[in-house]
Image: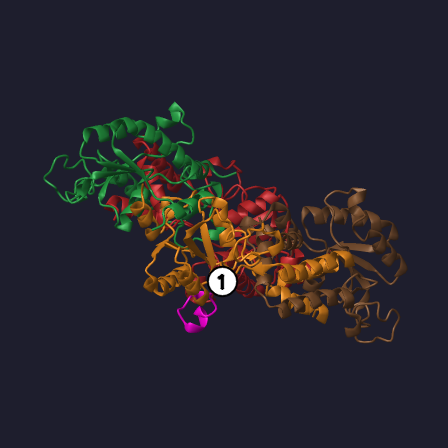
Chain colours: A orange, B green, C red, D brown
Amino acid sequence: MHPPSIQKLIDLFSKFPTVGPRTASRFVFYLLGKSKEEVDKLVVAILDLKKNVKLCKLCFNPFEPSFVKPSGGKGEGELCEICSNPARDKSLLCIIEKETDLLVIEKTKKYKGLYFILGGTVSRLKKADIEKLRTKELEERVKNHPEIKEIIIATNPTTEGEATTLYLERLLKPLNIKITRLGRGLPVGGELEYADEETLGSALEGRK
Amino acid sequence: MHPPSIQKLIDLFSKFPTVGPRTASRFVFYLLGKSKEEVDKLVVAILDLKKNVKLCKLCFNPFEPSFVKPSGGKGEGELCEICSNPARDKSLLCIIEKETDLLVIEKTKKYKGLYFILGGTVSRLKKADIEKLRTKELEERVKNHPEIKEIIIATNPTTEGEATTLYLERLLKPLNIKITRLGRGLPVGGELEYADEETLGSALEGRK
Amino acid sequence: MHPPSIQKLIDLFSKFPTVGPRTASRFVFYLLGKSKEEVDKLVVAILDLKKNVKLCKLCFNPFEPSFVKPSGGKGEGELCEICSNPARDKSLLCIIEKETDLLVIEKTKKYKGLYFILGGTVSRLKKADIEKLRTKELEERVKNHPEIKEIIIATNPTTEGEATTLYLERLLKPLNIKITRLGRGLPVGGELEYADEETLGSALEGRK
Amino acid sequence: MHPPSIQKLIDLFSKFPTVGPRTASRFVFYLLGKSKEEVDKLVVAILDLKKNVKLCKLCFNPFEPSFVKPSGGKGEGELCEICSNPARDKSLLCIIEKETDLLVIEKTKKYKGLYFILGGTVSRLKKADIEKLRTKELEERVKNHPEIKEIIIATNPTTEGEATTLYLERLLKPLNIKITRLGRGLPVGGELEYADEETLGSALEGRK
């Protein structure tokens, strides 16, 4: 129904997270209404993203080397701002699913340790699924950094997150490091009446 | 617009929790469609409720005296099944806003202490508002039961619940008993990405 | 879990339209918190409803005989305010599913004819289902009132409403009276982008 | 907080319709996870869109000249598939807000006329707002095509769409062509009980 150049871009935008064909077509009509200059600006920004942004060698957080303060230390140019910050507590490692989870934890200002971005979660403990995660990189990270004293597995408390946590606990157990999980309980604004039994049970046990 | 007998009942149903005039009128049309016998059954059930159900003298939980197992103990006929159960841990007192909160906590099977139903929350610490709560009854309960070693304030973690907790902590502090609150954290099924900073901060601090 | 007098009333309230067990239990706790006088007021209002309100012999609209202006005409005391109003256009008959539909049509002030409340819709044209509707009463009404020149079938444009309309059209066809349906189209506030094809097709055909 | 190359692209994606900063950042992390080849494919598709797609000279519908069947007629290469299709009814002109509205109307298969894409709606009849619409192009289109016998104003029945319709009616009135609007009424799946008075009034008046 759409001309091919429109359909092709709709198909590509439809693969973006949260985007379906209807939204994708709105994106295309939006771009059609923009001037050549504005569209070129977008294209340049996309190309710059791939050119300028690297993944941190330690935590896999995307960063822009030229904008990280020179640390003079080891790994300069290969480590993100957090990993190259001498003030961070290197004995704590927090494993998270994705980049945005790092951002929300940083916003709490309650965590001073380092991170490891796993790159997803698994719903089943199938080999093919697990290989999409950075589990080998995680093992290596922990083995090569004996200063790590506690690993916080901060996956989402969803079914997938729980399955992934179980897998990681099994993977990391032989390394004999303290492993913790985020506390369960009632969130701000929550109500007992609508809480599930497990959450409420954790809230009772975790009272203080 | 409605005949007076219909309008009057719509007005009364509209005062029920969660019911607006539209739903109230559906209730009335529902009753109009029922036989005399069925409506009488409802009327009898409402009258029986008021006749048969008492509030427990200790925790203010509604109960039906003739259906509580005879305990042979003190307060028989005046105490609900929980308060008259010798197996419950009398050193723990959990303060909750309302009856349904008691039910959800019981469902977790993680709590073996006793309860106190406060009868609501306050949004402002005005005298007029606070007097609607059972604060005097609470003080008396705690003073008369020196076996209480820990008071768990289990109001909802909402703005109103928090204000009420602050008030209760101030009220109970002079009695020198350990006071705790439900643990905060991510609920089952929650996602870090959408958690507020306070909840996530509590989840980090409460890790285990 | 609940005492029997509470559970019994929860069960009865759970049968009310839109009410589930959770809401029903909130209703019961609400009544438990009310004084004897207030609960008696509710009981009296329910009993009065059944005593004072009759269904109109013609349209089955509930009405309160003592509050309909005396018309001096035929059927006094048996007809609702609309059916006994000499100013209404008796050549128009609008068939609706339920009482509230009559109220919303009256509010438009665009309709001056009479009504017939069918008492529901059917999802399948099974005999058992159809017998729950007032189809016999409808046939009689139309046959006994040769002044009716147009029958507007105003069931909801839902699957059930459509099935019922098909049935009524077949039922009324032999009587040789003009039968119409409500116009289809975009509602106020609607958007073409989210309209289904049938609605949009009707809106195009019904343009003016 | 984000490195500049990430922030810049987040800002650009945030301007896309329906996209906020949170979704925009998910888009960027999605692209960071893609290979160079895949990102290049997207860039090429965006550049191709601007290179290959033209706006139709008559209706402003985007089309791809090389994919419109040669008509041999006037305006070849400048007209979209619909405008250059000799089978379409040139006496009917349907004014719509945006491209997707054309697509949904085509899907109904109930309309065989031509279109004009206005390019938006106005909430106030301010000159600055109106000049963003293609009103001059519309006037010219109608004046230069005396074969047009009916103009269907098919803006959304929202407040903005209504204001725009009023403006267009005033603009086109002097040209002395029949002007119609889409029919109002209940949409498929709608319910009388929740319909506003205007919609229900239109549905009654438009009965058939």
Image coordinates of residue B141 in percent, x first then y, are: 23, 30
Residue type, numbered disc 1: Gly
Q: Residue furthest left?
A: B72
* Residue at the far top in the pictured view: B127
Q: Say whether residue D127 is magenta.
A: no
Q: Nearer the viewer, residue D185 or A51?
A: A51
Residue at image coords 90%, 59%:
D144
The correct choice, above or below, for A178 with respect to A133 in the image is above
Q: Nearer the viewer, residue D138 or C20?
A: D138
Magenta span of residues: A123-135
Give the side of residue B111 with respect to residue C118, left or right: left
Q: Position of residue B152 (x, y in %)?
A: 29, 38
**Residue C11 appears in the picture as rendered:** no
Q: Residue at x 62, y 58 (%)?
A: C194
| Callout 1 secondary element | loop
| Quadrant of the rendered image containing residue D60 | bottom right
Q: Is residue A13 visible?
A: yes
Direction from residue B17 to residue D29 in the image, left or right: right
In the displayed structure, would residue B162 be above or below residue A124? above
Horizontal and vertical percent for residue C132? Answer: 43, 59
Question: Horizontal and vertical percent for residue A68?
Answer: 58, 52
Reading the image, the residue beneath label 1 is A119
Q: C25 or D58, which lies in front?
A: D58
Output the chain of dot 1. Answer: A
